[in-house]
């Protein structure tokens, strides 16, 4: 019970800290005259991954590579199967293929890059450099293609920057929100890791399994809240764009930074099972987006069923 309490407290702190950091950063960007396009692309799209970033860095520095890598891979799987599946059940999500083709293809490409760089064993500092260079190239490409405002997806990122309301108004509150967000993220990551490691030891399952499931879902709550709000408001492009942006940053940014700080050996079950599930879910989403031009409730149900099946296999067939 104590370990479960640690996880719940850690998730709560991470969620609150992520929200505070995003709102403070958006308010600061607005005062500094940063465009809504860039704010949505970087701050919201990637800011919702801040819990994953802090937890993976903390895990890497504390010699918990299974949690560091499992958190990213599990979050990418959960973002598509769990979050988009849930959002599609709430409201069928019509999408503009031209607006999302770049990001959906990039998610698949980043997943393939992960498989290549892992090479059957580990992620080292040279791999980290490749991830980060790929992220920089993606950001440059995305901003360049959106800067003119002619691309349909320009509206997506501008909408993301305004999806969150109640931003702090004064400089003091902006600084307070950013600092408080960072403090809560750091504290939440340490408490969450303590609970996750305790549960893994108590029930005799690997830290990789805990990282891929409990930790991954817990750190994905900001993506869940943003996407569900967008689905309820019928802003399908925001919900899908938020998930695609977060998945890109998870792989290229978080693993890049984590492996740069500390080389990360990859657990055998991730190599045998989870990395292929991650790639398959990215391809499945790509197929859904470009064949039906929408995510229907049936497709949402398929995604959710896939996540239930994945979690079931994680604790049974691949639970070691």
Image (tube, rainbow, N blue to C red):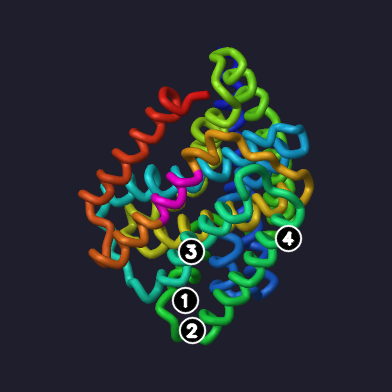
User: Contact, CB < 8 Å: mark 1 with mark 3?
Assistant: no
Name the disc covering residue 154, or none.
Answer: 1
Name the disc covering residue 160, or none.
Answer: 3
User: Who is closer to the viewer here, 304 or 44?
Assistant: 304
User: Contact, CB < 8 Å: mark 3 with mark 2?
Assistant: no
- Compare marks 2 and 1 and give the one earlier in the sequence: 2
Q: Is residue 94 left or right of residue 118?
A: left
Measured along the vertical axis of the image, is residue 165 above or below residue 308? below
Q: What is the spatial separation of the Cα atoms under label 3 and label 4, in whole angstroms?
A: 29 Å
User: Who is closer to the viewer here, 112 or 287?
Assistant: 112
Measured along the vertical axis of the image, is residue 253 above or below residue 134? above
Q: Is residue 119 visible?
A: yes
- Compare marks 2 and 4 and give the one earlier in the sequence: 4
Measured from the top left, where is residue 7 in percent x and y? 58, 26
Measured along the vertical axis of the image, is residue 109 above or below residue 250? below
Measured from the top left, where is residue 44 in percent x and y? 55, 59
Measured from the top left, where is residue 309 in percent x and y? 34, 34
Measured from the top left, where is residue 139 in percent x and y? 61, 70
- Compare marks 1 and 4 and give the one earlier in the sequence: 4
Q: Secondary structure at mark 1?
A: helix
Q: Which residue is the extreme one toward the front?
A: 120
Is disc 2 surrounded by few (<14), some (14 to 19) or many (20+) residues within 10 Å?
Answer: few
Q: Secondary structure at mark 3?
A: helix
Q: What is the spatial separation of the Cα atoms under label 1 and label 3, in whole angstroms?
A: 10 Å
Q: Is residue 273 left or right of residue 259?
A: left
Which span of residues is magenta-colored? Answer: 275-282
Is disc 3 surrounded by few (<14), some (14 to 19) or many (20+) residues within 10 Å?
Answer: many
Query: Residue beneath label 4, please?
Result: 129
Q: What is the spatial separation of the Cα atoms under label 1 and label 4, in whole angstroms?
A: 29 Å
Residue drawn at x 46%, y 46% as measured from the top left: 276
Q: Name the quadrant of the N terminus.
A: top right
Name the disc covering residue 149, or none.
Answer: 2
């Amino acid at each position: 019970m104590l370990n479960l309490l640690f996880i719940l407290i850690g998730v709560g702190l991470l969620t609150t800290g992520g929200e505070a950091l995003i709102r403070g950063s958006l308010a600061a960007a607005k005062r500094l005259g940063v465009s809504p396009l860039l704010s949505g692309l970087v701050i919201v799209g990637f800011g919702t991954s801040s819990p994953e970033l802090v937890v993976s860095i903390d895990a890497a520095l504390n010699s918990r590579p299974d949690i560091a890598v499992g958190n990213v891979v599990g979050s990418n799987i959960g973002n598509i199967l769990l979050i988009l599946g849930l959002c599609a059940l709430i409201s069928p999500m019509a999408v503009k293929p031209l607006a999302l083709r770049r990001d959906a293809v990039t998610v698949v490409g980043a997943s393939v890059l992960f498989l290549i760089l892992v090479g059957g064993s580990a992620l080292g500092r040279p791999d980290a450099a490749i991830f980060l260079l790929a992220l920089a190239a993606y950001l440059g490409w995305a901003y360049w293609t959106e800067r003119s405002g002619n691309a349909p997806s320009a509206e997506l990122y501008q909408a993301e920057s305004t999806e969150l309301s109640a931003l702090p108004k004064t400089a003091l509150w902006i600084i307070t929100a950013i600092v408080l967000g960072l403090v809560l993220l750091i504290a939440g990551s340490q408490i969450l890791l303590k609970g996750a490691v305790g549960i893994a030891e108590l029930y005799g399952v690997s830290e990789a399994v805990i990282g891929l499931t409990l930790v991954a879902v817990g750190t994905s709550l900001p993506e869940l809240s943003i996407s569900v709000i967008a689905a309820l408001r019928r802003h399908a492009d925001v919900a899908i764009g938020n998930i695609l942006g977060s998945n890109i940053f998870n792989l290229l940014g978080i693993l890049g930074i984590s492996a740069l700080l500390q080389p990360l050996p990859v657990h055998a079950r991730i190599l045998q099972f989870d990395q292929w599930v991650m790639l398959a879910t990215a391809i499945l989403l790509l197929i859904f987006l470009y064949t039906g031009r929408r995510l229907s409730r049936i497709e949402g149900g398929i995604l959710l069923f896939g996540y239930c099946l994945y979690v079931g296999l994680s604790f049974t067939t691949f639970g070691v």
